Structures are given as structure tokens and as C-alpha cells.
Amino acid sequence: MPLTTSLDIGPLFLASELLVGRGLAVLSAWALLNLVGSGYFVSRADRRYEPYYFHGMNVGWGLVNAGLACWGILHLHFTAPAGLRLADLVQAQLLNENLFLFNTGLDVAYIMTGFYLRALARQPAQLKPVRLLGFGRSLWVQGGFLLLFDAVMWALLHGQGQGWLPLLA
């Protein structure tokens, strides 16, 4: 179908916002799980052992993820902006796709940093190897979840955007 001036892109915009909103809900749930679960366990852990640092780092990740999710939710729109054009919608879609794709690369870096910290903890000169072990394991868990999350979000957004290609012809 060729692009005409009568094309109503409002539903496309809302579908995109809904998809991003659902993703932010998943990120919020993950953040809450980390804040509550690891918050509980870190308060009962001994600083001399790895679980203290693992759960402490997870609480930190929970705060960051909660902040990012809140920021994203506050920027969601529940109605299409007046004068929205298909080109604007496609540009915003590509920006979101690229953001999630970039984040998958960061997630791989988090996981690899976890491996590095765990290897560093095994060096004889380390003063606090349990801290490095706990932080490294947290980076594995957080990076692994975020890698899955960002890859799925990219795939869903990309699939949605591909469905719009016939409108551009």
C-alpha cells in the first residue's frame, strides 16, 4: 500500500509505546526482584564471604535498573503526538532498536568483566578475593539477564519495524 496522507499512524505509535512499556515493566520487575531478594540476603550475609558482595552488587544493579525503568516509563506517551509523521515514527523505532542493540554489546562486556574479576580474585596478592568473586558472579547474573532482555527487546522492536516497511513503499 503506497504511503498516503490519509494513513493513520496513531495505532502504530501506540503499539510501539506498548511494546517498550511492557519491556520496561519486565525491567522493573527484575529491579524489584534484585532489590527485595538481594536486599534480604545481603542484610543476613557475612562480609567475610562471597554472598555478601554478590547480593550487595545486585542491590546496586537493582537501583540502577529501577532508575532506568522509571525514567523510561515517565517518557512513555499514551497518545500519539499531534502532527506525527511516519518518518518520525520510523526514526524513533530505529533509535530504540539501536539502543537495545548497543546495550547487548554492553551486556557482553559486563559478563566478560565478571570473568575477569573472578580470575583476578584467584591471584595470590589479592587482599579481598571474596569481594571480586561476589562482584564477578553478580556481573554474570546481571549481564546474562540484561543480554537476554536487550536481545529480545531488539528482536521484538525489529520485527515490529519490519512490519512497517510496506507502508514506506
Image (tube, helix red, strand yellow):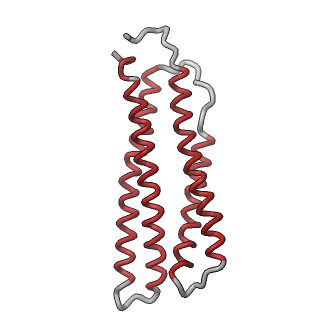
Residue positioned 37% across, 91% down in the render: 125
Residue positioned 45% across, 72% down in the render: 137
Q: Is residue 24 above or below residue 91?
A: below
Question: In which quadrant of the rendered view does residue 162 lie?
Answer: top left
Tag count in the figure?
A: 0
Residue positioned 56% across, 72% down in the render: 55
Question: In which quadrant of the rendered view does residue 77 lie?
Answer: top right
Q: Is residue 102 above or below residue 169?
A: below
Where residue 62 appears, x then y in whole percent? 58, 61
Where residue 75 appears, x then y in whole percent? 59, 39
Residue positioned 34% across, 86% down in the render: 123
Q: Is residue 53 above or below residue 102?
A: below
Where residue 114 appears, x then y in whole percent? 40, 70
Where residue 33 appears, x then y in whole percent? 61, 60
- For the N terminus, which image quadrant? top left
- For the C terminus, which image quadrant? top left
Residue 46 falls left or right of residue 100: right
125 or 33, which lies in front?
33
152 or 109, which lies in front?
152
Q: Is residue 121 above or below residue 24?
A: below
